[in-house]
Amino acid sequence: MTRHEIRRLGEATRDPAVSLFMLLPLALLHLSGRHGAQLETFFLVESVLEWAGSTGITVLWILLAVCFLWAVGRIQALSLPWRGGAVLILLEGLVWAVVLGPGLMALTRWLPLAASPLWLGEARTGFAVASASLGSVHTSLAVAAGAGLYEELLFRLIGLGAVALALNFLFRHFAAELTSRRLALFLALLFSAFTFAAAHGLYGNTQAFEPDVLAFRTIAGLSFGLLFIFRGLAVCAYAHFAYDAIYLLLPS
């Protein structure tokens, strides 16, 4: 593989069409298995879809179809190496999910905070797939896919990316361009991380506001935010999906 091909492959992983194309399987996986999930499993995703009802799901399917057609059209028009980019996004997301487990544990211990029930702890030594039914595995993967997709779209793409752009537009009237951009990105990163942590308690999950759990999710939000900034939305979404999937499928 030439240096030019490697560079093109790296660019493909950050291209919006390839990123969007890779998000579609997460949406399809979530929609295919969300009815088997308990509403309280993942408050934020399931509660919103429960509130939206059949109309919301219909609109979501239409948006998915439009996004798919746009992504395919751009990939073909630019001759993007989407297959290699997709493989890299998937593998990198899995790697980051594995790294985040011990990384978040180390950070919360160093602060120090009490052990979080959301840790991928040492007691989780093997996958529970063998003892679980195929339906329960599908449901767990569907729930994880919904969290990885919708929460990253909301808290990273909008809560971080869009808020950073808005703040930068405001700050650049009072500060130098580089200072404005860095300050906007820093404040948006904090905002997205805290709202990500707090939003999990909006639908009656009082445990989400316990100091140690809130702090853990805020740290996780900061980690996903940095991943979004440096590696892009698709890698971030797959890392989130893989982390939650491991958490749900491993025995406690």
Image (cartoon, rainbow, N blue to C red):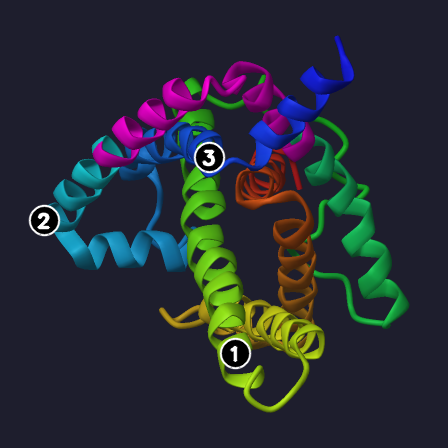
Q: Magenta segment, which residues? A: 66-93
Residue that label 2 marks:
55
What residue is shown at x 46% (from left), y 17% (from top)?
79
Considering the image in quadrants, where does the C terminus appear? Answer: top right
Q: Report the amino acid beneath label 2.
A: Thr
- At 37% across and 21% down in the image, what residue appears? 77
Given residues 232 and 97, the one toward you in this image is: 232
Circle 3 Cα neighbour tier, 10 Å, few/some/many (<14 / 14–19 / ≥20): many
Tell me residue 68's x, y (percent): 30, 29
Q: Gap in Å between the C-alphas at discs 2 and 3?
A: 25 Å
The numbered disc on residue 71 is none
Q: Nearer the viewer, mark 1 or mark 2?
A: 1
* Residue at (52, 78) in percent of width and height: 167
Q: Residue furthest left?
A: 55
Residue at the right extreme, as displayed: 110
Instruction: Specify whether 101 is left or right of 65.
Output: right
Asked where in the image residue 28 lies, by quadrant, the reply is top left
Q: Nearer the viewer, residue 218 or 62?
A: 62
Where residue 167 is drawn, which disc sits there? 1
Quadrant in which residue 127 is drawn: top right
Local SS, label 2: helix
Query: Which residue is identified by label 3?
Result: 140
Give the percent coordinates (x, y) of residue 216: 68, 65
Q: Residues within 10 Å of mark 1 (few under 14, many from 20)?
A: some
